[in-house]
Image (tube, rainbow, N blue to C red):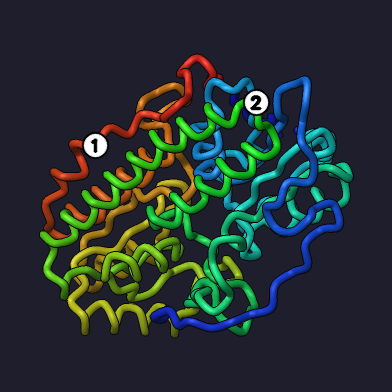
């Protein structure tokens, strides 16, 4: 069962950075602290894409999944309310992205979870520090790597594998359910990955250029052979300086970037200005954490979110997105009735 808690420029480079110590309540990152017996698991998640992946694996197990971060919220600056402490206190497992994305939530969890609660940072678990990426929105000197691993399908599949394995250890009675749900989800992730490879091939390499409001596609770009030209939102989450805007306009003109991509949730007058001054199309509908459609609708899933963004980018750059459009993005293992309105 899923529910939501009601809450009262630059090209990237690879570099290493020190990580935070795991809270004392864990027995190692994403290691099970205690087996749960005699009742359903209580699971807390953070951003909507992770909530969706976890929900698809727990479907049919009776586990309760509570997403802390409202959809359409800036997860980098989200401050959980005091009411979240009670939810975290009763959790058996807390799934976070990690890579310094949800530090206020992580701090609240560390202060409130029980001694047997497992606090699992999925991104931190799957990606060695030597492969962390830094860029305009996430500069190395700021100490925060780009955390958006879930926009790269193979990495999202690795998230799902960790979720399956951890929940199977915590709740062995439902291990077969978790395994079956993972297999279904994994097949959809693989199909999405294959369709994106096919769609990318229809876009000439010199046009596979991304200038976005927020740099959520560094790992995606590396996997599919795209180039991140830059991002409008700097690490401070303020508007870029006039000098930075001028530099981006120069890059767009020099590289002949066909389109610039804004966020549906966070409109950018700067991107619109860049589009007007360079002739690049301004597309303002990309979604970072906001799943398409309403809860219970077929598109309201991690894979629905990824397909929407991938189709938007492919078509804006002149490619053929038909391979993506034919995919089934319905949530796997989740009864639509379990998505509250």
Q: CA distance from mark 2 to mark 1?
A: 32 Å
Q: Nearer the viewer, mark 2 or mark 1?
A: 2
Q: Is residue 210 left or right of residue 266?
A: left
Residue appearing at x 82%, y 58% in the figure: 23
The percent position of residue 201, horizontal first and vertical second, equals: 14, 62
Asked if 202 appears above or below 163 in the picture, the reply is below
Q: Residue at x 61, y 58 (%)?
A: 76
Q: How many marks?
A: 2
**Displayed quadrant of residue 256:** bottom left
Residue 246 picture location, percent across and down: 37, 82
Q: Is residue 9 left or right of residue 59?
A: left
Report the disc number at residue 327: 1
SS for tag 1?
Answer: loop
Q: Is residue 164 left or right of residue 25?
A: left
Instruction: Name the spot of residue 3 as percent of width and height, x first.
Output: 62, 26
- Farthest-out residue, top: 337
Which is nearer the N-term, disc 2 or disc 1?
A: 2
Residue position for label 2: 173
**Most foreground residue, 245 or 188:** 188
Element type at mark 2: helix
Q: Which of the two residues, 230 or 4, is positioned nearer the viewer here?
A: 4
Instruction: Say whether marks 2 and 1 touch (CB < 8 Å).
Output: no
């Amino acid at each position: 069962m899923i529910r939501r808690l009601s809450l009262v420029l630059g090209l990237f480079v690879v570099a290493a950075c020190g990580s935070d110590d795991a809270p004392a309540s864990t027995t190692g990152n994403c290691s099970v602290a205690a087996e749960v017996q005699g009742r359903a698991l209580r699971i807390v998640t953070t951003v909507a894409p992770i909530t969706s992946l976890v929900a698809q694996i727990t479907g049919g197990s009776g586990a309760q999944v509570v997403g802390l971060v409202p959809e359409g919220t800036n997860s980098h600056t989200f401050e959980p309310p005091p009411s979240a402490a009670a939810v975290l206190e009763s959790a058996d497992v807390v799934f976070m992205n990690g890579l310094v994305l949800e530090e206020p939530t992580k701090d609240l969890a560390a202060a409130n979870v029980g001694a047997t609660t497992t606090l699992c940072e999925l991104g931190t678990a799957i990606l060695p520090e030597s492969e962390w990426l830094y860029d305009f929105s996430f500069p190395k000197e700021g100490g925060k790597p780009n955390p958006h691993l879930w926009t790269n399908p193979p990495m999202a599949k690795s998230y799902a594998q960790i979720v399956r394995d951890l929940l199977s250890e915590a709740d062995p009675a439902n291990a077969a359910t978790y395994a079956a749900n993972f297999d279904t989800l994994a097949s959809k992730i693989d199909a999405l990955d294959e369709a994106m490879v096919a769609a990318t091939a229809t876009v000439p390499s010199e046009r596979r250029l991304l200038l976005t409001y927020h740099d959520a596609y560094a790992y995606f770009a590396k996997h599919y052979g795209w180039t991140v030209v830059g991002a409008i939102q700097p690490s401070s989450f303020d508007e870029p300086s006039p000098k930075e805007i001028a530099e981006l306009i120069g890059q767009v003109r020099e590289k002949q970037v066909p389109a610039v991509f804004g966020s549906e949730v966070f409109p950018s007058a700067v991107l619109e200005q860049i589009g007007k001054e360079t002739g690049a199309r301004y597309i303002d509908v990309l979604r970072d954490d906001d799943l398409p459609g309403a809860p219970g609708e077929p598109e309201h899933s991690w894979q629905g979110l990824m397909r929407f963004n991938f189709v938007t980018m492919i078509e804006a750059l002149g490619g053929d997105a038909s391979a993506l459009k034919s995919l089934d993005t319905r949530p796997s293992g989740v009864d639509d009735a379990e998505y509250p309105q």
